[in-house]
Image: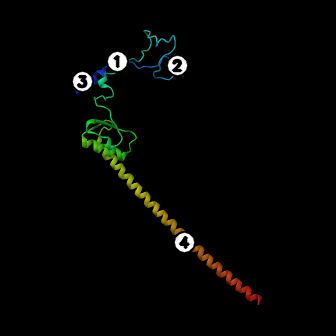
Amino acid sequence: MINEQTIKEAVALRKTQKKRKPTFLRQNVGIVRVRNGWRRARGGQAKVRLKLRSYRKQPSIGYSSPRAARHRTSQGYEQHVVSSPSELKKEMKAIIVGRTVGERKRLDIIKRAQELGLIIMNIKDTQAYVTDVQTMLQANKEKRAQKTKKKEALKKEVEKKEKESKEKQQQEQGEDKKKKETEEKKKVLEQK
């Protein structure tokens, strides 16, 4: 197993190596239709592939970082992306909370990590973050409660209006029936 001293030395060495490492771009990057980024030169007379002196450098194994420093942060911690509190372990030392994790579960992960004494890499001030999120969640809860109250009030108003309209229709129908009956009586009387 690699001890912490060698890891720190490897991380420091990686930092100095990365300063000297060139940016690897493809051969014809100056042309507008060609995108940046590395693509291996495959042409027969490609100067980059031939490794001629004044042309771009190619990626090679010599540019790689020390094995002890690979997949580690700048502080020397292993990167563990966590998406639920059950994934946390004491041996991790430092974690990164996954970007697709929601606010409530993120709070649970932060609290559990603080209990275990873990460092959270992608949240700078955890205490301030927790208070901000809790206030936001509380505000959202209040908004939802107000929304449901408004919906219920609107429902009651609609029901009242429907009842009133039904009563009016019934009254009008009743009056119409009375008028028809009286008219029929008048007709019957006139016929006699």
Most distant residue in the front direction: 1
- Left-right relation of 137 to 168: left
Give how far across and how far down residue 86 sits, in percent. Answer: 32, 43
Q: CA distance from mark 3 to mark 4?
A: 84 Å
Q: Is residue 55 above or below residue 16?
A: above
Q: Is residue 82 or residue 27 the one in the foreground?
A: 82
Place of residue 76 in the rendered image (x, y in percent of width and height, measured from the top left): 28, 29
Identify the secondary structure beneath mark 4.
Answer: helix
| First along the sequence among labels 1 and 4 | 1
Amino acid type, residue under disc 2 in the picture? Ile
Residue 93 in sight from this viewpoint: no
* Mark in the foreground, 3 or 1: 3
Q: Which mark is residue 31?
A: 2
Instruction: Name the N-terminal-most of marks 3 and 1.
Output: 3
Instruction: State the mark number for residue 164.
Output: 4
Residue 180 position by quadrant = bottom right
**What's the amino acid at mark 3?**
Thr
Examine the image and state in which quarter residue 178 appears: bottom right
**The disc labelled 1 sits on which kind of residue?**
Arg
Left or right placement of residue 141 versus residue 166 in this view: left
Q: CA distance from mark 1 to mark 2?
A: 26 Å
Alpha carbon distance from label 1 to label 4: 83 Å
- Of the image marks 2 and 4, the number of the one nearer the N terminus: 2
- On the image, the x and y values in percent for residue 134 come to 33, 49
The answer to whether 46 is drawn above or below residue 103 in the figure is above
Q: Residues within 10 Å of mark 1 (few under 14, many from 20)?
A: few
Q: Which residue is mark 3?
A: 6
